[in-house]
């Protein structure tokens, strides 16, 4: 991350959300990470580090181009909704699967542990190219269409109910009594021949 910030100085800005709880989970590496963050914020004018940021507000901003993410489902969905491409750093299997799906759409790149700083920076630069941004915007429009289509379904059912009511769509078994609902009458009819046959055999075989 430090390399990305330094290489992008004067061209791109970075906003990082780093929770204290996340830092504490780093164990012995906390001091080194905090030192790196302090050095970056002191020497670079293109970075903001906060414990919490209004992510959706940032996604809404027209200058937001790339979301650096661990590829959690919620964040990826929000990035898709706002047409933001993604640089993924997945940690567990399901996050790798989510990132792979986004790569298949052409709106994400994954930073591999084996990647050099140059390779990660190249992937970040590629995500800001017009062709990738167009694919991200296409994904945004697809999600808008899905949302409108869902709203259309709700509106059509509401109009239908207002005109015709929903009584004829109610499950008729709601009016059944307990015997009918639990099929006791059918069970009785099925057991009756068995009982009659058993009674006949008992009498026939009785000495």
Image (cartoon, rainbow, N blue to C red):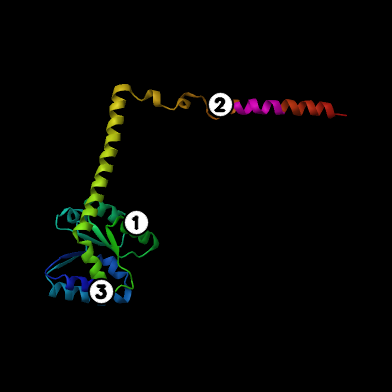
SS state under label 1: helix
Name which of mark 1 and mark 2 comes first in the sequence: 1
Q: Nearer the viewer, residue 117 or 175?
A: 117
Q: Which residues are magenta?
A: 186-194
Name which of mark 3 and mark 1 comes first in the sequence: 1
Neighbour tally class for label 3: few under 14, some 14-19, many 20 plus, Cα within 10 Å? some
Name which of mark 3 and mark 2 comes first in the sequence: 3
Percent coordinates x, y for residue 34 in the rendering: 23, 74
Percent coordinates x, y for residue 68 in the rendering: 25, 63
User: Is residue 188 rendered magenta in the image?
Assistant: yes
Residue marked by disc 1: 101
Q: Which mark is residue 179?
A: 2
Q: Is residue 148 above or below residue 36?
A: above
Q: Residue at x 51, y 24 (%)?
A: 177
Q: How many marks?
A: 3
Q: Is residue 168 above or below residue 153?
A: above
1 or 2: mark nearer the eye:
1
Q: Principal SS element in the magenta part?
A: helix
Residue marked by disc 3: 117
SS state under label 3: helix
Q: Nearer the viewer, residue 150 or 23?
A: 150
* Whether label 3 touches label 1, CB < 8 Å: no
Q: Which mark is residue 119?
A: none
Residue found at the far front of this picture? 131
């Amino acid at each position: 991350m430090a390399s990305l910030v330094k290489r992008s100085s004067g061209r791109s800005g970075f906003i990082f959300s780093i929770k204290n709880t996340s830092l504490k989970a780093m164990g012995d590496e906390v001091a080194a990470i905090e030192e790196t963050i302090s050095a970056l914020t002191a020497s670079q004018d293109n970075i903001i580090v906060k414990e919490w940021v209004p992510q959706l507000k940032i996604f809404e901003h027209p200058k937001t181009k790339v979301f650096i993410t661990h590829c959690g489902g919620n964040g990826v969905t929000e990035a898709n909704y706002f047409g933001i491409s993604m640089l993924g750093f997945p940690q567990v299997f399901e996050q790798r699967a989510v990132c792979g799906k986004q790569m298949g759409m052409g709106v994400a790149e994954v930073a591999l542990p084996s990647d050099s700083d140059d390779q990660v920076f190249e992937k970040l630069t590629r995500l800001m190219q017009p062709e990738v941004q167009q694919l991200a915007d296409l994904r945004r429009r697809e999600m808008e269409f899905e949302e409108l289509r869902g709203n259309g379904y709700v509106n059509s059912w509401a109009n239908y109910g207002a005109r015709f009511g929903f009584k004829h769509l109610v499950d008729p078994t709601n009016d059944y009594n307990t015997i009918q609902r639990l099929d006791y009458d059918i069970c009785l009819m099925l057991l009756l021949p068995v009982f009659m046959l058993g009674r006949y055999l008992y009498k026939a075989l009785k000495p």
